[in-house]
Amino acid sequence: MIRNYDVLIIGSGSAGLTLALHLESKLKIAVLAKRNLEEGASLYAQGGISVVLDKKDSTQSHIEDTMRTGVGLCHKETVQFTVEQAKSAIDWLIQEGTIFTRDKSAKTHYHLTQEGGHSHRRVIHAADSTGWTVETKLVELAKQHSNIEFFENHIAIDLITQYKLGNCTKSNQCLGAYVFNTTTNKVDTFSARYVVIATGGAGKAYLYTSNPDVCTGDGIAMGWRAGCRVANMEFVQFHPTCLYHPNAKSFLITEALRGEGGLLLLPDGLSFMHLFDERKELAPRDIVARAIDHQMKRLGIDHVYLSISHKPKSFIRQSFPTIYARCLEFGIDIAKDPIPVVPAAHYTCGGLMANLYGQTDLPHLYAIGETAHTGLHGANRMASNSLLECLVFARSAANHINKNIINVPQPENLPLWDESQVIDSEEEIVVAHNWDELRRFMWDYVGIVRTVKRLERAKHRIDLLVREITDYYSNFRITNDLIELRNLATVADLIILSALDRKESRGLHYILDYPNQARVAKDTILTPKGYYTTHYSRNE
């Protein structure tokens, strides 16, 4: 079946839905969701959204903190653009009915927390479930728009481009996508004047991650295969504090808990962050994660502890109701007991190269949110700048599409998906084994602390794995697991290639062979073979 839309949005998180809500109501919009609409990284974001609301704070301070945390690789123009748009993005959420936590001492003001890397309290939040509050509100709003059609349980396989259709006489451009319906096991052709990738990051490339199962790097992999450059894929942020429990599935313990006085402790009760950074528990995430990793390896322990029990129980239950209740399910009363925590893969700082409007190298293709590399995060994302990025760039991309879509015709004569040369697989266990192997060697060899030898081992293994997966993909009918495995392998390869290319330690990329920082900070940019790039300027 061929489905025709003005705008196809791949991803239903805060970036994708915010964009849909800012597109003109006369446009016919499709939103794809791999599971249900709400499921994605946005839903599980606990901390909040960075925004300057305190009179003692300033946008300049927010810019400086972001630049400092990004260790010389943030693009100043992008940081300034994002920070200056923050207030209007938050105002829009509030006007649409999003309820954030108020300050009890001054009920006319919102309560602001302080997280790692921030020099002021500037994180607006909804208790400790900000992502859930924002995402459910966006879903509620989007369902009120008759021009937005939702496709739950649909996963995009690949983008459709001029070149992939064999038409190399015209300039390459995005025409739509092939999409797999996981309920019917059928593939539809989605034709669109514009395609927007908002699929989030690739935390599932690692054995331990705070990300939900849907975060398999789909958008980055599809964009790369379509001819888009990627940048800074080596910078994978490991969140320092995920709950360590066999049944917790890497439940995140928000950085705001440390912002409110939480202390990291060794098993004997001694604190240790003062040994690594003068900011202690409020140091940026890369420093905290490496400190914990160092102590775990030094002592041969599986985890460290995070304690907030020195605060009043009423304060803890009011400030962190979700964490309190969740930990209690596992027999941990955080008002009395320290929380066992361990770092886990959390955020992909690199991605498809995109400008201030979300435009990628491929005409008519946009990338927003965690999928994109805009230069905002540099070598290390500052806490709570992620949801902010989703909001700001979704609004910017929507405005750009609204202005330019009148000049873009509907693609015609797109072919249907061809599966005439493939058969059903009787060896699906191979997919599960490959998935497990990939995530384990990425954790062991491409983790928080790296070496050239480990990276070379990882590269050898990913090359073998990519060949196996490509052969499997070419001969058997697709499944959801196969699509995700193929994408994860692509993204893992990009992470390894980028890590091998960076001959220094900077931010989230710490490599023992090159422990010092290079004098000149440069982005790691990879270009797909066989493609020339037509990257849009920052302000086009």
Image (cartoon, grey):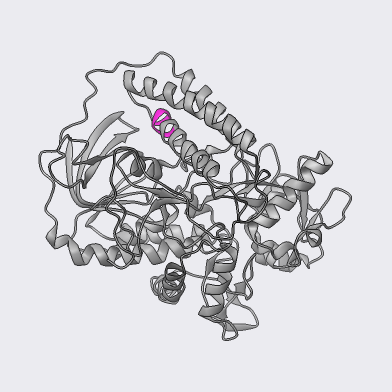
Q: Residue at x 38, y 63 (%)?
A: 393
| Above or below: residue 28 compared with residue 473 | below
| Above or below: residue 288 compared with residue 161 | below
* Residue 26, picture quadrant: bottom left
Q: Residue at x 68, y 47 (%)?
A: 243
Q: Residue 308 or 166: which is nearer the viewer?
A: 166
Overall secondary structure of the magenta section: helix
Q: Quadrant of the N terminus?
A: top left
Q: Is residue 226 magenta?
A: no
The outermost residue toward the bottom is 55
Find the magenta span and give its range: 480-484
The image shows residue 468 at horizontal and vertical percentages of 43, 21
Q: Quadrant of the C terminus?
A: bottom left
| Above or below: residue 46 compared with residue 114 | above
Q: Residue 247 or 298: which is nearer the viewer?
A: 298
The image shows residue 27 at horizontal and vertical percentages of 19, 59
- Specify whether 279 is left or right of 107: right
The image shows residue 162 at horizontal and vertical percentages of 18, 41
